Amino acid sequence: MYDMLTALINGALGWGWPEWALNLLSYILIVTIVLVVAPLQMLFFTYYERRVIARMQDRVGPNRVGPEGIWQPIADGVKMFTKEDIVPQAADRIVHFLAPCVVVAPTVLMFAVVPWGPGMVPVDLPTGLLFFFAISSISAVGLMMAGWASNNKFSLLGAMRAVAQMVSYEIPAVLSLIAIVIIVGSLSINEIIAYQAGLIISNRDLPGVPDLGLGWFVFTPVGFVAFVAFFIAALAEGERTPFDIPEADSEIVAGYMTEYSGMKFGLFYLAQYVLNFLLCAITAIIFFGGWQGPGVGWLYAQGITPANPNGNGLFNVLAGILGVFYFLLKTYIFFFVMVWLRGAFPRLRIDQLMDFGWKFLIPWTLANLFSAALWVAFTRWGPAEGMLITVGWSPVLRWLAAFVVTLAINLGVYLWLTRVYAASQAERRRAELEELSAAA
Amino acid sequence: MTASPFEIEIPRGRVIEVQRDDTRVRWGGGLLRGMAVVWKHWKESFKLNRSYSQIHGTFTIEYPEEQPRIPEAYRNMPILLYDDETGHELCTSCFQCERICPPQVIHMTQAKDPATGKPVPAVAEFIIEYDACMSCGFCAEVCPFDAIKMDHEFELSTDDHTRLTVHKEQLLRPISYYAKIAPTMWAEVRESALKKLQGNVRRRPDVIGLAPQLTEKIAARRAELAAQAVQAAQAAAAAPAAPAAAPAEGRKLTPEEKAAKLAAIRAAKTAQAGESATPAEAAPAPPSPAPAGEAAPSADKAAKLAAIRAANAAKKAAAGEAPATLPVAPADGMAGDTPADAPPAAPPADKAARLAAIRAANAAKKQQSGDGS
């Protein structure tokens, strides 16, 4: 944004604005765009989810408000705004009021590091990924506040579950991301996206590969395992249906949202959908190349970039449009998968959730971490790092060796873990029955 | 761990273990299979499904735009039927539906003949409280005349509560309407229903039993009746001895006739009863213009009374009909008419009255002769 504004105001228009004014203007514009886009995404996602889940259940879904019901979220929003705001008498009023804010704020902050297209990142933090996940954990505090302040047993139970679930599933999520960070060697989200240029294979590993923007991590064994583990963890983090234990409406009414009404409830709702959007987006960014796709890299190379200040601004716009298109397409596909999972699977029990997180996902992602290390060793290390086997191998051979070895490890670990996990679950069921028999 | 039990009794109740194949590991294939099922539903849901035998496809009927296909036996609210051609209601006010109605929302009054005050097989007012009706369909089931049927109309919502107390005029539908919404169900009962209706129509005087909203049908019926009256009057005028025929209808059995007959029967009965009575009990009768012509004991008197009554009935019938029909009807002339000297060409009402008188006289005579012997 700053580059584009500089080129436009000081270059094309020749007004000669000072640097601070340009910076200020660009950030105001960015913040405005983010604050407009975040709720719009949420509105679209509610409509999108309802239509998709309806189709999966052989229904039609909302199709009355506007063409094909596209204004349904607006109607819902109006409804939310006009509802009475009820605070329970026994509630801690201040905390009850603050909780929705504490839940919403981090989700909007997370937008700061999400790149929408080439050169379209609000803030290119060198530790963007860390920032993203550190901030996302803050909403757990807000959930706990909501549950505690409501002074309601369902709320508190929901909050407890939410916090337990978030804390448990952050570990596999972060472990699977670390595998990618090891390969890329950077926490910058832009770096991670830039690494996924190429064709099936990243052209950082394999120079000379044509850049079609398809060098996505999901095509490597390490990336695939990390993707599956991360997506499952993201479902738990975003409280999507197989893991929507914190707001299990058939058990604990609505969890921590029980005592909220009107727009406060609406804020929780907003936070949840914005978080889902961001989790889908970060999945798309880290494992599916974000805005990378055929044509974007080439278009962007013609535009105005720090490396190429004399480019054509039109190509920036074109690259931006195409990049945003790819990025949103991937994001929406992941949200579709989330809805699909919601349509397919029933809710887990809390013990099943914990078992799955701690006994399956964490060992699996830890093994994947080892694979990632091997991947780096095979593709990049030389005699200087003590990697003597690959001396003299061509890059393709190195890459192939890394692929085969990591594939073998990940597959072996998966097969072994599922066996162990199934056996442990069966054993647990037997133990429970035995206990029941003993009691009888 | 060997075979686990299927059932365990615990203090809180019984636990039944569902035996799952725990030893088989599907490596996530079970999850994918479940997702495949949902995918197929999603993919197929873009097609419409109207056969209801398929599990895929969208079943939804977009209601206000599309109307649901309602099965014939669907029942919502009861309606009354009337005949398309004559406009006669099928209902005879037999009160069966009112009796069986579980929430007791059916109310009716039977039509009465204005001339005689006798009930007629037709309904004067019929009310169903739709707001409390539970659509059980008992009324339609029990109706012996197939007059009350269950409608398919279900868009009944209103902001006016009183409109849910539905009166006869709003309840009435032509038979053709019911035959359209439930063709096979109507075909089953059509013949018997129409036959019963014909039988009932014969017993309905004037315009009683005609659907009240069919004003032109009622007017036509009135005109028909008037024309008949004129005809009858002309016929009466043509007959030499007839002072004035009652503007009797072409129908076989009018209430007047019926009354006359009844009187005759009653007279005969009284006469029979008089047979057992002793002459001492008999009071002297005043001279009368009865055909018996003599001072008669009680039996005689009864017979005479019957004759007078019959004559009165005939008179009344004539008087009652006259203002209702045409002014040209010379109904007033027959007031002094006695049954005895009635001409042979008299119209049916007169004839019946005369018949009653003769019968009464005969009975009296018989009684006398019986006494004398």
Image (cartoon, coloured by chain):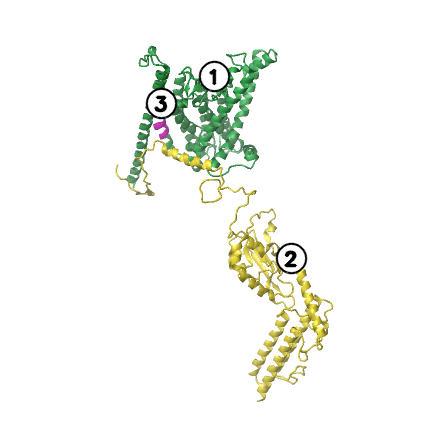
Residue A6 against residue B195 in the figure, above or below: above
Q: Colour of chain A?
A: green
**Residue identified by numbered label 3:** A368
Name of the residue lying farthest toward the left: B2
Amino acid carrying label 3: it is: Asn
Q: Are marks 2 and 1 on the same chain?
A: no
Amino acid carrying label 2: it is: Leu
**Residue identified by numbered label 1:** A125
State the residue in front, A346 or B45: B45
Q: Quadrant of residue A12?
A: top right
Chain bearing mark 3:
A
Disc 2 is placed on an element classified as: loop
Verify CB contact (< 8 Å) between mark 3 and mark 2.
no
C-alpha span from label 3 to label 2? 87 Å
C-alpha span from label 1 to label 3? 26 Å
Q: Colour of chain B?
A: yellow
Disc 3 is placed on an element classified as: helix
Give the magenta range.
Answer: A355-370
* Residue B367 horizontal/vertical position (percent): 59, 84
